[in-house]
Amino acid sequence: MNKAIEDKKIRTFTDLNAWREGHKLVLMIYKITRSFPKEELFGLTSQIRRCAVSITSNIAEGFSRKSYKEKVVFYSTALGSLTELQNQLLIARDVKYITEATFQKIADQTVLVHKIINGLIRESKIRHS
């Protein structure tokens, strides 16, 4: 096999674009939630962080599964967590914890991650057909 192609082979979940872009999203979430009010520490701050972490955790767990059916359960859960995060970001924006510009930047990242996870689901189906 060509060395360049072999180097691009996906060996671990961290090689997945879905995980990498999801990880960027997690870091963005942790950065913005640092400025949330202290009374939200066990409310929206905790919830929004858990949702973001759930996205990459489910991508990682799905990667380790052998069958398409098993993989898609975890990748679909990641999509559910992503949608939940999008809802929580709307709340954070509407209660003025984040600016419209910050909201838009993070919302754009959520859309990108959503598209990549959907691609991962399609690719997993092809590989396991």
Image (cartoon, grey):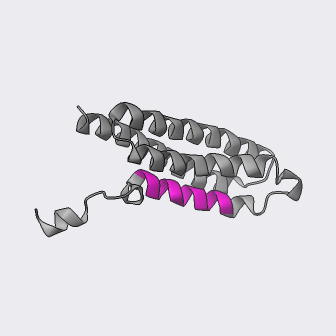
Decide: is 109 above or below 119.
below
In this rendering, position of residue 76 left or right of residue 63: right
State the residue lying farthest toward the right.
39
Most prominent secondary structure in the magenta stretch? helix
**Residue located 37% across and 58% down the image:** 12
- Quadrant location of residue 28? bottom right
Number of numbered labels in the structure image: 0
Residue 23 on the magenta segment = yes
Residue 81: x percent and y percent? 59, 40
Q: Nearer the viewer, residue 29 or 103?
A: 29
Read off the magenta span.
18-30
In the displayed structure, 70 sits above or below 33; it is above
Question: Residue 107 or 129: which is nearer the viewer?
Answer: 129
Image coords of residue 15 (percent x, y): 37, 59
**Image quadrant where residue 101 sits:** bottom right
User: Residue 117's image quarter?
Assistant: top left
Q: Is residue 31 magenta?
A: no
Residue 48's x, y, as percent?
A: 69, 48
At x 52%, y 51%, the residue is 56
The answer to whether 14 appears left or right of 99 in the picture is left
Q: Quadrant of the N terminus?
A: bottom left
Outermost residue to the left = 1
For the point 59% across and 62% down, the residue is 27
Q: Quadrant of the C terminus?
A: top left
Residue 120 pos. (x, y %): 36, 43
